[in-house]
Amino acid sequence: QVQLVESGGGLVQAGGSLRLSCVASGRTFSSYVMGWFRQAPGKEREFVAAITRSGASTDYADSVKGRFTISRDNAKNTVYLQMNSLKPEDTAVYYCNADPTHTIVQLTTTQGPYWGQGTQVTVSS
C-alpha cells in the first residue's frame, strides 16, 4: 500500500505556470506507474498524464500536450507535474494516482487504486 500527498496548487493567471508535487510513502515507489488526474466542478475526473516506473516514457491527454510535463524522482519518492501556459479551463482539483499493475496507456482509461487528497489549481482569465 502507498500513501500519496500532493502539493503545489494555487491561484495563477492565464499563461502562468505551476509545478505540482506528489510524495509517496513506502519503499516501493518505483514499482508504481504514476498518473495525474483532474476534476473540474460538475465534471467527471479525467486523465491528465502518466509516467512509467522508470520515468522513461510518458503519456498525456491531448488537452495538455505541449504544455504539461510529468516527471518523477524515484530517489525522492516524488512525481511532478509541471504546468505551463495555463488556461482557465485547466482549473480543477488535481489528484495523484499510483498504479501497480497497469501501463501508462491503460491509465488513460482506468486508474490505480491509490489516490492523494488532491490539490486545487485555479487559473484566472
Image (cartoon, helix red, strand yellow):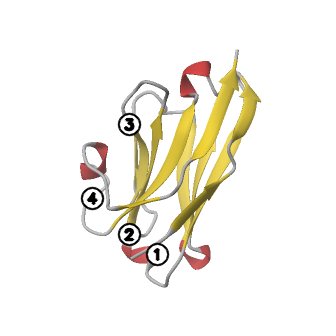
Quarter occupied by residue 121: top right
Quadrant the N terminus occupies: bottom left
Which badge, 4 or 2, is on the more N-terminal residue? 2
Residue type indicated by callout 2: Tyr
Task: Give the labeled residue for mark 4.
Answer: 103
Percent x, y for residue 45? 39, 37
Q: Is residue 40 left or right of residue 112?
A: right
Q: Position of residue 110 (x, y in %)?
A: 25, 48
Q: Is residue 39 above or below residue 9?
A: above
Q: State if disc 4 and disc 1 touch (CB < 8 Å).
A: no
Q: Amino acid at mark 4?
A: Thr
SS class of the residue under badge 2? loop
* Image location (x, y in percent) of residue 100: 31, 69
Tell me if mark 1 has few (under 14), some (14-19) or many (20+) residues whose alpha carbon lies within 10 angstroms of its own: many
Sequence-wise first label, 1 or 4: 1
**Quarter of the picture holding the C terminus:** top right
What residue is drawn where x is 53% and y is 43%?
Answer: 94
Disc 3 versus disc 1: distance between alpha carbons?
Answer: 23 Å
Element assignment for label 4: loop
Taking depth in this image into account, of 59 and 107 the one nearest to the observer is 107
Q: Are marks 4 and 2 in contact (CB under 8 Å)?
A: no
Question: Which amino acid lies under the numbered mark 1 shown in the image of this protein?
Answer: Phe
Q: Nearer the viewer, mark 1 or mark 4?
A: 1
Label 4, label 2: how many angstroms apart (C-alpha)?
10 Å
- Would you name the residue on which mark 2 appears? 32
Residue at image mark 3 = 46
Residue 23 is drawn in which quadrant?
A: bottom right
Secondary structure beneath disc 1? Answer: helix
Q: Nearer the viewer, mark 3 or mark 2?
A: 3
Residues at circles 1 and 2 in contact by the CB criterion of under 8 Å: yes
N-terminal of the pair, mark 3 or mark 2, is 2
The residue singled out by tag 1 in the image is 29
